[in-house]
Amino acid sequence: MTYLLGIDTGGTYTDAVVLDEEASRVIASAKSLTTRPDLAPGIGGAIDAAVAEAGIRAAEVALVSLSTTLATNALVEGQGGRVALVFIGFEEAEQHRSGLTEALKGDPVIALAGGHNHAGNEVAPLDLAELESAVRALGDGITGYAVAASFGTRNPTHELAARDLIRRLTGRPVTCSHELSAALNGPKRALTAVLNARLIGMIDHLISACEQHMAALGIDAPLMVVRGDGALVSARMARERPIETILSGPAASIAGASWLTGEHDALVSDIGGTTTDVCLLRHGKPAIDPMGARVGKYRTMVEAVAMRTTGLGGDSEVHLLEGLAGALWLGPRRLIPVALAARQWPDLVHPALDTALKSDVPNEHDGRFAIPMWAGDLPAGLSDREKTVAQRLANGPLRLVDTLRTRLDGASLDRLVARGMVMLSGVTPSDASHVLGRLDAWDGAASAKALTLLARKRNGRGERIAPAPEPLAQAIIDQLTRQTADCLLEAAFADDDLEWQDPPEVLARHQLMRAAMAGHSGTIRLQARLGVPVIGLGASASSYYGAVGDMVGARMILPRHAGVANAIGAVVGQVSMHASGLVTAGGPGVFVAHLAEGPARFAEQDDAIAALTADLTRQARAQALASGVEEPRITVTRDVTSAEVEGQPMFIEASLRVTAQGRPRIAVG
C-alpha cells in the first residue's frame, strides 16, 4: 500500500494530511505552528505527526505535494527581498505604469537602451558593458534581479543576454519577464518579474526545508508544488517561478473544498492567519481570472483562480480608527498574537504587560513587541538607521517602546517589517477568541492583559473604548464578522450575471445593501441574501463563520477536515503545463512565428502556425515530463484574427496555447 502526503504552509500553521493511494479518504491529519525564520521545525512537526497518526512507514509515501500562502501573504503585506529591475528599451514614464513604482518600493532600476519592436526586430543594441558597470555598482544586499525588455515576448534575446551577464557577475537568481507571460504590456510584465524576484528566496527556503525533512525521514518520492491555478508543478519549476505560487494555498483550498463537500455551486471562503480568500465554485470548478492573478493591490500576469484575497485573518492587526466613536478596523498586516508571543517568550511578555497595567498613563505601544526574524549576523543591505534599530533586536524580541527610541526609528522599523526581517506582536482576533473562551491554543491570560490595555485607550470623546476586555473582544469578533461578510458580498457582486454599474467593493458596502442585508422594514421593505451556500474553510472557520452565514443569509457549510483543506487540495490535483505564443503579420506574404529562440519568418500562414505549434508543444511537454507526468495529454487551442480588406481576408495574428496535462508519477516501493 502506498500513500499520498499533502502539506500546506501558512502564516500561522503548517498542516499535513495523509491520503490513501486513490486519494479517496483522509487517513490522518496534523497541525504544527509555522516556524520563522527557520521553516523546517514547523514543516517537520506537521509531517511527523501526520505520519505517526496514520501508522505508516515514511517509506510508504509515494507522492508529496506542497501548497503555501507564504507568497500571497508576502505580497499582501508588502514583504520580500530587495531586488533590482533591469528595464530595457522603455521610456522613463513607463516605470510608473501598472503599479510598478509602488511594487519596487524604492529598489533600484537599471534603465538601458535596447529592446525590440512588435515584429521582433531590434530597436537599439543592448550595451552589456553599461549593464555590467551598473550591476557592480549596486554592491551587496540585492537578493534577486528582474529583467524586462520592450517586446521581450516577441524577441527575448536582450532579456536572455542580460540574464546571463547578471548570473555570471552575481550568482543571484534572475527572472526574465518573457518566461512568466507571453502577453504584451511591458510594465505589467516587469511588475510580475519584480514580484517573482522578490519571492525567490522565500519559496526556495520553503521547498528546501520540505526536501530536507523528507530525506531525513527516508521519503523517496516526487515533491510537487501547487500553482495558483490549482495545477501541480515540480519543485524545481516552483523555485524558478515562485510568482506562480501566489494563490497556491487558496487554489488548493478550492480543490479541497470540492473534494470534501461534493458541492458544485458555492462561494468558498478560506480564513487563515493573514488573509481571507474567496472564490466562486461553479459547476464544480473555480473560474480562472482572465486578467491575471490579483493579490492585494497588485494585478499580475500570472494565471490563477479568480480569487479575491483580502488582508483579513485570525492574526490581523487591530486598529483603533480616529473619530468620536473609536471604531475598529482589522488588517491588512499580520501580527504575532500576544497569546502566542507569551507562550514563546513568557519572560518578556508577561512582565511587560504587568508593568504597563500598573501605569495610569497609557502608552501607544503598550502590549506590542518587536520580534527579529533573522538568525546570526544582521541582514545585509540595511541603512545606518535600520542597522541601529536592528542592532537593538540582535539579542531577541523587545517591547516596542524599547525598540523605538526616537520618532525616526518608526520608519526604519516599518521598512524592516516590510522586508520580512521583523514581525510585530500585538492584539489580534485570535487574542479576542482566547478572551471569549473560543480558543485555548496559547496563553489566554496574556490576551486578557493585552486587551485590558487596549480597552483603556480613548476615543474622540475622551472615553475608554471599552469598559473591560470581554466587551472589546466581542467588538473585535463582530468587526471580523462584518469585514468577512463584505469579502463575500464583493465576490458575489463580481461574479453576478447582472452588469452592475458600480464596482463590487462599492456595492457590497452601499447603504441600501446594508439595510437589505439587515432586513430593513419600514415605509420601504428591503431584503437581500447570497444566492449560493458558503463553504467555510480554515482552522478558525468553525469559530467565526456561523455568525457570518447569519449576516449574509446563506447556508454555511463547515466540512470535516475544513482546517486542513489546503493540504488535501495540494495532493488531489494534477499537472497542467501551458505554453503560449503568437504568429504575427510581418508584411505582405510574411508570417512571423515568435518562437522560444526568437522570431522565424515564413511565406505561408500554415507553415508559421505549424512551426509555433511544434515549438509550444515541445515546451509544454518538456515541462510536464519534468514535473513527473509519464505521458502527458496534449491539447492545442488557437485563435486566428483577420480582417476583410477590399473583399479579401487579411491575416492579423494567430494566438496559440498548448497544454500538457496528467497526474504526476508516484514512487514505487
Image (spheres, helix red, strand yellow):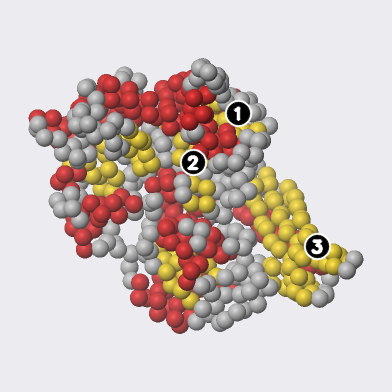
Furthest residue to the right? 647
Q: In this view, does 441 lie to the left or right of 247?
A: left
Would you identify the image quadrant in which residue 184 lies? bottom right
Cα distance between the residues tagged 2 and 3: 38 Å
Q: Are marks 2 and 3 in contact (CB under 8 Å)?
A: no
The three-letter code of the residue at mark 1 reads: Ala
Residue type beneath disc 2: Thr
Q: Which of marks 1 and 2 is nearer the N terminus?
A: 1
Disc 3: CA contacts within 10 A as few (<14), some (14-19) or many (>=20): few
**Residue located farthest toward the front when viewing the structure as drawn:** 523
* Residue at 28% over, 51% down: 414
Disc on the earlier residue, 2 or 3: 2
Number of the label disc, if any, that sits on residue 309: 2
**Closest to the observer: 641 or 341?**
641
The CA span between labels 1 and 2 is 17 Å
Residue at x 25%, y 55% (from the top left corner) = 412
Q: In this view, does 616 lie above or below 460?
A: below
- Asked whether, in this view, residue 188 is left or right of residue 647, the answer is left
161 shown above or below 354: below
Across and down, in percent, residue 463 comes to 20, 28
Tell which tag, 2 or 3, sits nearer the viewer.
Answer: 3
Provide the residue designation for mark 3: 642
Residue 471: % across, % down: 28, 21
Mark 1 lies on residue: 266
Q: Is residue 229 above or below residue 123?
A: above
SS class, disc 1: strand
Where residue 429 sits, quadrant-wise, is: top left
Residue 470 visible somewhere in the drawing: yes
